[in-house]
Image: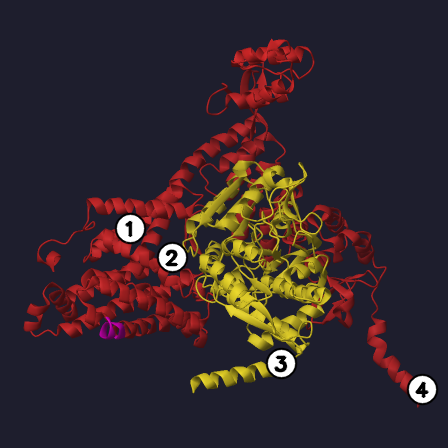
Amino acid sequence: MARFLVLLWIVFSLPASAVAQQADAPIQTLLQEHGEIIAKSSRRTIGPAIDALAASGLSEAQTVLERWQAKEMWLNEETGLFVWAEEIDRSTIRIFDFADNGEIGEVPDDNFKQLKPNSGIRGMIAAALVQFQLRDPSPAARARALTAIERDAEDSHLGALRATKEDEANPDLKARMERLERLLTIQFGETDEERIAAIDHFAGDLGLDVRAALNPLVATRVEAAEATPEGEDIVQTLSPGSDALSREEAYEILVRGDLAKPRISRDDKREALIANISDGTVAGVQVASLDSEEARDLAYAALARDGVVDAVATEAEVDETLATFTFFERYTGAPPAVALAAATVLNGIEAKVAVNQTADLALDAVSLASIYFLAAIGLAITFGVMGVINMAHGEFIMMGAYTGFVVQQFVPDHTVSIIIAIPLAFLVTFAAGVLMERTVIRHLYHRPLETLLATFGISIALQQIAKNIFGTQARPLTAPSWLDGSLVFNDIVSISYIRIAIFVLALLFLALFLFVMNRTRLGLEVRAVTQNPRMAASMGINPDKINMLTFGFGSGIAGIAGVAIGLYAKVTSEMGADYIVQAFMTVVVGGVGNIWGTLLGASLVGTLQKYIEFLNPSNTLAAQTYMILFIILFIQFRPRGIIALKGRAAEA
Amino acid sequence: MSHKLLATSAAALLAGTVAASACDDPIKVGVLHSLSGTMAISETTLKDTMEMLVDIQNEKGGVLGCQLEAVVVDPASDWPLFAEKARELLTVHEVDVIFGNWTSVSRKSVLPVIEELNGLLFYPVQYEGEESSKNVFYTGAAPNQQAIPATDYFLEELEVEKFALLGTDYVYPRTTNNILESYLQQKGIPAEDIFVNYTPFGHSDWSKIVADVVALGADGKKVGVISTINGDANVGFYKELAAAGISADDIPVVAFSVGEEELAGLDTSNLVGHLAAWNYFQSAESDANEEWVASWKERMGEDRVTNDPMEAHYIGFNMWVNAAEAAGTTDVDAVRTAMYGQEFPNLTGGTAVMLPNHHLAKPVLIGEIQEDGQFDIISQTEEVPGDAWTDFLPESAVLMSDWQEKGCGMFNTETNTCVQIKSNY
């Protein structure tokens, strides 16, 4: 019986003991050799380990590198051996031997340390893996190799690319390979001719990678000599005191090259003189006579002759020395012929870059304008047509966004949920608008101050209610995946799809507004009521009902705008407050009561904002301040906005 | 009638407290965090943390045999109101210690009150340094415990050569970016390779700024973004990054104000690999942390996360408890003296030590954002002692803070004199 138990024990413990790790396999030995730096996991020291693996010629090296890159390599801290592992749960892992990819067993992870290479090391591993992956049968692996080269190109990649590019069957990958091959030729090509040929090929190319490859080639250094040397690598001569080379910089170059005596600042000179005052004199000169710069220079020179202080140049000497030298720029990034070719191509590219940057800025401006327009269009109805100053307009936007968030909690499909959310947001905010009109606004028509205060109070209350229901943290409103990413024209001009969607939505709303106002009975009645409520009433229109519906319509549109804004920015209880000022500005600048004015106002505000941001890229807050200043000025000259209503409507 | 009722109930209440413990009064712990307004988004969590810590301590028997009582006030994200509420806590409620504040501007507003009335404040958030008050213990990170190590990581591990410093326009990002600009230039990064931008709170239109950052790479240098963007502006920023298809391998972003809590409002699938630097991540593997996370989730709900300022309160509160026990009283001066050298295990597996400059020695962690909104810790340093006065600005390099030996928070080491005692600079 005891024998049987022993046998049973052996049988059951067999998997663990039989598949013991091969501690002396070549790959493990190699890893052990570099065990310390692998465990340390720092980009600065890891180089030798990755190089050794890549150059080892062992077939397991690729597995090791791939597992390591994927954070799947673990270190057994007891034995010091490396394994790869799958995590089963928080505290158990299934470990495998690198030597034969055999499973060793399931173990608790207490004695194992997961190696987590940072993205710097992962990049190096990826670069080392290129040699294995470039000929991998799977296109995805080959694409990964190309991405690795794009990020972290090495000398050796050029040969590898040239060797594989002809055999590449996938046309996309082949195109990428050819482009990469040229880029690498620019960097690592052996002869100037092939580098220049590769450079010329990129004439007019806007790619960021091209500029990144070319710019280091045209690096220059300013040097000085008695006479400008002849040579192709001299870019230009510079005169000290010009914009390109200030007098101070020029002299500094001479001092660094030991071609001139150092200078000293006035304050330091003064300190040195004061430090050497004895009996009212400095180096034999009366202190009282040191009342001019020249006198102080002379006294300092006397001190220098005595060896008390280091000799320095006076201003006059500086000018004299500068005059005896010429200054010139020399190419240092590449041989002159290559640098010249690069400079020519870059000049052509830069001109195109400027045009494209303007185009990109214009796209941004259009996008911002459409966001402002969307935020303002509801207000154009409630404020523009009805004349109600609704400070809670922003909160209707917020309500719409939260409606979208709530819908996404119940409908997980993002496309469907947005399709449901848009009409639902309209209904919710329409109802809220009607409720607010019935309970508050109705009693305050033609009393703008009271309306302003009352709606401001409502806006604060709505914000706090939202905080109580949804919490204070921003909530995600996720766009459908087909709206992810950007429409990319080139590396400079691109716009995200979500912004295009907002632009389209803004156009749709413009059309909807025009249709409702000009082509429907409701629109006719709204216009009648806003022009002359009493006359309209006597024609059988119920002004009360029309006011209610108009206010609801304006609020409903704000709700839909909220869904759109939530998709591109954020959903918080305060999001409405971020847009209320811009929305009012848009309506006021455009001209109250005219939708085309609102459109123009949004375009003006959006463009101006982007233009000021372009002029002052380091402070976006300042851009907004300047813009508001401009708009105040604008209102001084056109108090009724861009498109001013004329005739009876204006007096209504 | 009502008077009588009031009197009886008050008497009953009093009797109850006396019976419950041997104390005359429960020890009062002030909690000064905004529960409304813009900062409620972050500070409410800390209020909940403090209430949880007080409850846990009470279960263990309180402090000095007395029960603790949390006195919660709401300064409503209104900076001057912070000073009023701090005064109320100290004079009306007579609390023994205050845990509170988030933004630096609110802390600056509280300083004069707390120094005048000799209160004790534990401040749990990473901040810009350049300050040392006798009455404040800074349990969050100083710049050398967050910003500088993260920048080193960029320079050394990711070989970033060009920096975009993006921040919200207020005191913390501006001071931090000043320090970083000066530090980077000392490290040999030319001034033209440092791009700085400030945006207003809640900024949402990021497309141009992201395009500017991408364009920085045109000269072939590797670009990295150091973000001190605060609050919900981060949502729009990360959405625009994702839309522009910027991978963390091309342009890494390290954030100093984005933690687990902030990521909860984001779809993180496109942000995988971007970085954050903190002294604590929820994903830290230690028994203490697992217990902490479990009790937090049990109290607040499964979907709630823990974050770095919570750990700062956890360490600060426990150190205060131990210091009070060691001093045998909750008297401010006695507790302060007992605080120096206090050690308490932090949640990431090491030990936090309270230094004479009122800062902690804590490890610096760098984490990569994962799909589930948690951070994968890829770098963890040894404990770094917090430095009140940064070494990277010439005017503060000569200053040091030592309240234990020198009794001075702004001590000039060149002239060997104490510049000033109060922190009204």
> Where residue B242 appears, x then y in whole percent?
49, 57
Mark 4 belongs to which subunit?
Answer: A
Decide which of tag 2 and tag 4 comes sooner along the chain.
4
**Mark 1 → mark 4, Cα distance in angstroms:** 91 Å
In-front residue for pair B175/A404: B175
Question: What colour is chain B?
Answer: yellow
* Label 2 – label 3 distance at C-alpha: 65 Å
Q: Position of residue A52 (x, y in %)?
A: 76, 49
For residue B422, which numbered disc appears in the image?
A: none
Q: Which residue is mark 4?
A: A3
Q: For residue B18, which numbered disc appears in the image? A: 3
Q: Chain of mark 1?
A: A
Q: Earlier in the sequence, mark 1 or mark 4?
A: 4
Q: Amino acid at mark 1?
A: Ser
Is residue A283 shown above or below A187?
above
Name the magenta segment's main secondary structure: helix
The answer to whether one can see residue B302 in this image is no
State how far apart marks 1 and 2 are (Cα). Answer: 15 Å
Specify start and end residues of the magenta stretch as a single range.
Answer: A435-440
Chain (red): A
The amino acid type, in three-letter code, at marker 4 is: Arg
Q: Position of residue B405 (x, y in %)?
A: 71, 49
Q: Which of the 4 quarters of the picture holds residue A405?
A: bottom left
* Crowd class of label 4 (few under 14; some 14 to 19; many from 20; radius 10 Å): few
